[in-house]
Image (cartoon, helix red, strand yellow):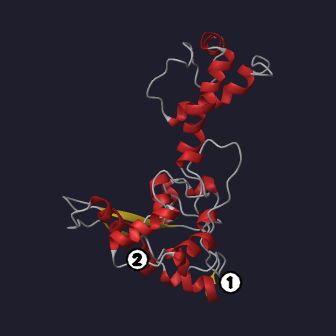
Amino acid sequence: MTSARVAHPLLLGLANIRMHTRTKLSSRAFLLTALLPIPQYLHPNQRMQGVLKDRLIHECLVIVLKPLMIAAEIGIMMSDPVGNVRHCYTPLAAYIVDTPEACMLACVRGKTSPFTMASYLEFGDSFCHPERTRSVTLEQLANIKADPNNLEAFFEACAEYRLNGVHAPFWMYWPYADPSVFLTLESLHHWHKEFWDHDLHWCLVAVGALELDFRFSILQPITGYHHFSCGISKLKQVTGRVHRDVQRYIIGLIAGTAPLVL
């Protein structure tokens, strides 16, 4: 947008397009469907302004995506690439967003998993928590007796379930749409950054920083692969591409060096 006007772009694509085609900008596999507004609110409480912003996004999604919600329920006649007319349904396969937006769409507060029932105090548990399914969230919203129009009271009542104050999520009107299914993990933070911040630190402790740096430095340079001539323990401000390059080597470099019992 220009000047001081900003908006959230909403892009729409088909799940049956191959990834290598969909990720190319020249393929134009995504269609700009709408620009979701980002207004300024007059409410004196910053937390309540956040609730209003989240509610507005969900209400806009209901309006813009209503035809797809209807088609997901009763179907719609559409033509395929070769011209045949088919009776199609439009379920929500995936909604690609970063972690804060995933929490907003799942109707949970910050420091809460949008995929499971775990909160930040339970992120280190050694077992998998139950999924935060559609039915669980809708049941929690139904148990809240406060008036949604009373922002402060409703937000306070949501604290028991760690919900963010959205009383009518857009996916409740979309048949078969489940946040635990259509919210996909973000590869940069959930895979590469998680490896760099946690798994690699374990490797540095188990193998030793000097030893691991030495093993990286003596690797034969290979065309197309990053060569870490000075090791990796002192790297700063690395990108997701560097995270991925380290992952390509790490299994072979730590094999047989870590103790069986710590």
Query: Is residue 7 shown above or below 216?
Result: below
For the residue marked with disc 2, what is the amino acid? Glu
Front one among 63 and 14: 63
Q: Is residue 203 left or right of residue 149?
A: right
Mark 1 burial class by Cα count in 10 Å: few <14, some 14-19, many 20+ = few
- What residue does disc 2 label? 59
Foreground residue among 126 and 177 = 126
Give residue 173's quadrant in the image.
bottom right
Residue drawn 57% across the image and 58% down it: 22
Could you say which is closer to the camera, residue 15 or residue 154? 154
Query: At label 1, which amino acid type do we have?
Result: Asn
Q: Looking at the rendering, which quadrant does residue 227 occupy?
A: top right
Residue 138, horizontal then vertical, whole percent: 56, 75
Q: How many marks?
A: 2
Find residue 62 and report its image quarter.
bottom left
Q: Decide if residue 16 is in sight here.
A: yes
Q: Residue 104 appears at what percent x and percent y?
A: 45, 62
The tag earlier along the polypeptide, 1 or 2, is: 2
Q: Nearer the viewer, mark 1 or mark 2?
A: 2
Left of 146 or right of it: where is 39? Answer: left
Residue drawn at 63 percent across, 67 percent down: 133
Label 1 residue SS? loop
Q: Secondary structure at mark 2?
A: helix
* Placement of the C terminus among the 4 image quadrants: top right
Structural distance between the alpha carbons of marks 1 and 2: 35 Å
Q: Quadrant of the N terminus?
A: bottom left
Q: Can residue 225 be seen in this snapshot?
A: no
Q: Mark 1 = which residue?
A: 84
- Above or below residue 221? Residue 202 is below
Residue 131 location (% of width, % of height): 66, 60
